[in-house]
Amino acid sequence: MQEKMQPHAKGMIVMASAMLFLPLLDAIGKWLATVDSVPPATISFSRFFVQSLLTAAILLSLGGWKGLRTHNLKGNLFRGAIMGVGSVCFFAAVKYMPLADATAVFFVEPLLLTLLSAFVLKEQVGWRRLTAVAVGFIGTLIVVQPSFELFGWVSLLPLGTAACMAIYLAMNRKYSIADSPLVMQFYAGIGGAAFTAPVIIAGEIAGHADLAFGLATMPLSWALLAALGLIGTLGHLLVVQAFRLAPASMLAPFQYLEIVMAVLIGLLAFGEFPTPSKWVGIFIIAGSGIYVFIRERRVKEGVADEKRAKALA
């Protein structure tokens, strides 16, 4: 009889699926900001507002008002606020930068997450995982081939998103023990909307176009704003579930798969065709995640074989 897949292996598969799905958020945000001139702060608020409505409807239908109960109210709201900061930064970045370039600058985040998992979550992080993360980061540099222009002030926006995302994912691992993914995403949606709403008010007062409120003018834009919430909810539900199954440091290399989708979406939606060197980088990125997956399965199989041998001894 075939053994059931180990939780860590399931977590890696779920994480990889999320990373192939979430770049649609960035592409939609870029289209809304550049084609219909919807301010990035408004895009972020719409994403979190729809997310909170969707998850509330599901939770209420499954368990009534008791379904909204959380064991970590402040922590989950803070998760949402952190994501609100990162979301505004990244949607503003892709308004001015190519999607793949902004995504690659963002990918300092797995390195930050690995450090957080070691020093904050006290997880065991071996040299092989650290090497896989480093190799994946090298792959992102090959994909993007950073130019001097990327190091202007706009390039700091994806770095801000990276720091926020690393904190968010580390908190996922901590709070997912007590709360379900749906509950976590409901309060994250409230926290994100609660953060972006004052930002929009401040942007209106200050006259800052990117932080102000702006209505979509095209029918398609309204549909895309709703889709942002749906994609964000489903994608981050997958991320939360992955962190319930596997350690943060083990999942970090799989985040590099997001650059694969960013390049493909950039090609299809924005006409950015990757050069041969970028394809080399893509294979390096994917390889780092696949390496961690294969190694984890072998380690688990080795432990299982050792236990069987002791049992038979």
Image (cartoon, helix red, strand yellow):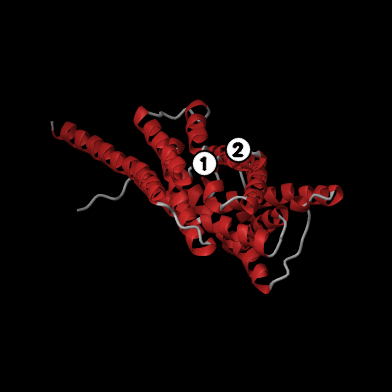
Label 2 amino acid? Answer: Phe
User: How many other residues sit within 10 Å of disc 1, few (<14), some (14-19) or many (≥20)?
Assistant: some
Q: Where is 94 relative to 298, above or below?
A: below
Q: Residue at x 25, y 39 (%)?
A: 298
* Quadrant of the rendered image containing residue 167: top right
Location of the C terminus by quadrant is top left
* Quadrant of the rendered image containing residue 126: top left
The residue beneath circle 2 is 151
Residue 206 visible here: yes
Q: Where is 85 relative to 49, above or below?
A: above
Q: Where is 68 relative to 216, above or below?
A: above
**Image marks 1 and 2: residues in contact by CB distance under 8 Å:** yes
Choose between 74 and 150: the one closer to the eye: 150
Residue 169: assigned label: none
Choose between 283 and 80: the one closer to the eye: 283
Distance between mark 1 and mark 2 Cα atoms: 8 Å
- What element does badge 2 sit on? helix
Residue 146: assigned label: 1
Q: x, y (%) of residue 141?
A: 46, 40
Label 1 amino acid? Answer: Pro
* Extreme residue in the left direction: 313
Q: x, y (%) of residue 296?
A: 31, 39
